[in-house]
Image (spheres, rainbow, N blue to C red):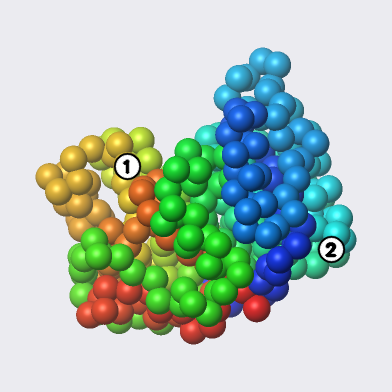
Amino acid sequence: MSVAPLTRPARLRPGARVVVVAPSGPVPGERLQEGLAVLRDWGLDPVAGRHALDVHPEFGYLAGADEARARDLEEAWCDPSVDAVICARGGYGAQRMVDLVDWAAMRAAGPKVFVGYSDITALHEAFAVRLGLATLHGPMAAAVSFLTDARTQESLRATLFEPESVMTLTTRTARVLVPGRARGVTLGGCVSLLAAGLGAPHARAGARGGLLLVEDIGEEAYRLDRILTQLLRSGWLDGVAGVALGSWEDCGPYEQEVRTLLRDRLAPLGVPVVEELGFGHCAGALTVPLGVPGVLDTDARALTLDVPALR
């Protein structure tokens, strides 16, 4: 079965209520307050989830207990006064709580905007498979990259309020790894999380017919090799229409090692591949919708959406 377009939630308007939750790693309180202030300056009405500042008593890399993190997401989503849920940060932990969420209740609550990236890839996949909902691979409210980078902020703000203004996604750094043109529906995120989800309950069957967007951070070349090889061997990449590559921060020398690896693993797929498209763990990161149809064109070095990310 090919990747199909997903339901797009409504764009945000001034005064929209936004809840910031922490599904993964612990969140510094001052950074959370700074993030809420940015959202407030945009005319939104942001609040933090009840457990957003929790820290797990035994595992300091988690923002509180798995059940509490799941309840924060669920309660925010099921509150009819809430228009959007934005993650505070990534790290690790989304996989531990994703199966504790009441997805039936979330489905009944209807579509809303959901934003995050990195470890939040596990939740993007759950929203796609379990709710049939398009989401935004974008910056998180308490992340340093969001708080200190005006271009990152503007890409998210424009996508939330004026999505028709950001339907062509490209950067000056974008380059062609494998030439061509492909049409499909966007999916993806942090490539290590996609590989880690193989075989999990409700996992996506594969990327057939899709435009795969992938990036990562802190994975040495041999680990990226293992991740991509796992996706290839499992058949998950069979029939993918095209691939857009984001940032590879702290993954080794890009030109001498990472780029060579990406070409080695992806070029045999025989589909267009654009690199350095400017999303992920990088300065000026673009907000990219997942679950939206579009065209990846290596002549233009761009991903052009057929419709705005939000209605």
Residue 223, visible in the rendered structure: no
Q: In this view, does 169 lie above or below 120?
A: below
Residue 232 image-quadrant placement: bottom left
Q: Position of residue 283 (x, y in %)?
A: 36, 49
Calculate the distance from the C-alpha at mark 2 to the C-alpha at mark 1: 37 Å
Which quadrant is the N terminus positioned in?
bottom right
Total number of numbered discs in the rendering: 2
Q: Residue 234 — which label?
A: none
Comparing 233 with 24, the one in front is 24
**Label located before the other in sequence (2 or 1):** 2
Residue 93 image-quadrant placement: top right
Comparing 278 with 132, the one in front is 278
In the structure shown, which secondary structural element does the residue marked by tag 2 occupy? helix
Which quadrant is the C terminus positioned in?
bottom right
Q: Mark 2 points at which residue?
A: 109
The residue at 24%/61% (across/down) is 173
Q: Position of residue 131 (x, y in %)?
A: 72, 64
Q: Where is residue 71 in the image (x, y as percent from the top left)?
A: 81, 41
Query: Image check: 134 left or right of 147?
Result: right
The residue at 62%/58% (across/down) is 42
Comparing 228 with 193, the one in front is 193
Residue 48, visible in the rendered structure: yes
Q: Name the residue under label 1.
A: 249
Query: Image check: 280 left or right of 156?
Result: left
Q: Callout 2: 10 Å neighbours few (<14), some, many (20+)?
A: some
**Which amino acid is tagged 1?**
Glu
**Which amino acid is tagged 2?**
Ala
Q: Position of residue 50 (x, y in %)?
A: 80, 36
The residue at 62%/19% (across/down) is 59
Marks 2 and 1 close (CB-CB < 8 Å): no
In the structure shown, which secondary structural element does the residue marked by tag 1 occupy? strand
